[in-house]
């Protein structure tokens, strides 16, 4: 499994490479009034305007101080495409790409549930070389959250 490792505050996360279209410099072009709280704003990438999710929303608020670093998020944006949905994810840094063999994927999340990440965004945990458990972003869940509001607005409108 090929993964991109990235940091939000001092927490390392990963995502499958197949869902990341590219990595661009951070910062949003326009805030989005009346958007979900997790939407930081919009970014124009070569004429395509995409919503950008604030990466700190993947971290439990009670643990945010424990994971603070000197910089806010916004250092880089992962441009993600999943099931016809395009959006950005604002992160502090991108650490690199790693090929992790499937047996190092941990299917039992319960043991690691108290490490400061919001579990609803964790698909599973990946074992690293130094025995750290790295949360694998649940891209299906995140993309579903991106479309829920749009579908509700279409039904109302």
Image (cartoon, helix red, strand yellow):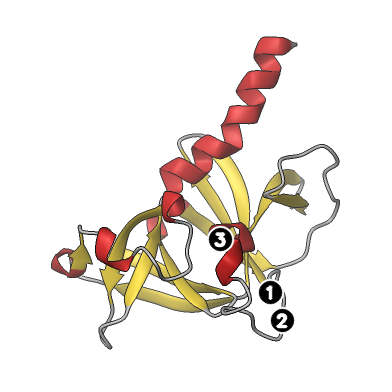
Residue 109 occupies which quadrant of the picture? bottom left
Q: Is residue 93 left or right of residue 137?
A: right
SS type, badge 1: loop
**CA–CA distance in space, label 2 to label 1:** 8 Å
Measuring from the top left, give residue 50's x and y in whole percent: 70, 45
Closer to the camera in the image, 80 or 153:
153
Q: Circle 3 is placed at which residue position? A: 22
Q: Is residue 103 left or right of residue 29?
A: left
Residue occupying image coordinates x 67% and y 49%: 38
Instruction: Tell which circle, 3 or 1, labels the residue nearer the N-terminal end.
Output: 3
Instruction: Tell which circle, 2 or 3, labels the residue nearer the N-terminal end.
Output: 3
**CA–CA distance in space, label 2 to label 3:** 22 Å
**CA–CA distance in space, label 3 to label 1:** 14 Å
- Total numbered circles: 3
Image quadrant occupied by the N terminus:
bottom left
Q: Are marks 2 and 1 in contact (CB under 8 Å)?
A: yes
Residue 68 occupies which quadrant of the picture? bottom right
Residue 14: give its label.
none
Residue 75: give its label.
1
Q: Label 3 neighbourhood size at 10 Å, few (<14), some (14-19), many (20+)?
A: few
Residue occupying image coordinates x 70% and y 20%: 153
Measuring from the top left, give residue 138's x and y in whole percent: 41, 50
Residue 61 occupies which quadrant of the picture? bottom right
Q: Circle 2 is placed at which residue position? A: 71
Measuring from the top left, give residue 101's x and y in whole percent: 18, 69
SS type, badge 3: strand
């Amino acid at each position: 499994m090929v993964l991109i490792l990235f940091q939000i505050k001092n927490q390392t996360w990963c995502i499958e490479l197949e869902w990341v279209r590219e990595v661009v410099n951070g910062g949003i072009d326009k805030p989005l009034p009346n958007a979900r709280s997790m939407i930081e704003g919009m970014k124009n990438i070569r004429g395509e305007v995409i919503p950008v999710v604030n990466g700190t929303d993947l971290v439990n608020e009670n643990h945010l101080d424990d994971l603070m670093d000197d910089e806010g998020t916004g250092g880089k944006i992962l441009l993600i495409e999943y099931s016809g949905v395009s959006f950005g994810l604002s992160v502090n840094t991108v650490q690199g790409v790693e090929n992790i063999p499937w047996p190092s994927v941990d299917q039992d999340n319960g043991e690691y549930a108290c490490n400061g990440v919001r579990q609803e965004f964790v698909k599973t945990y990946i074992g690293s070389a130094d025995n750290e458990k790295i949360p694998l972003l649940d891209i299906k869940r995140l993309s579903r959250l991106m479309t829920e509001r749009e579908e509700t607005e279409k039904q109302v409108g």
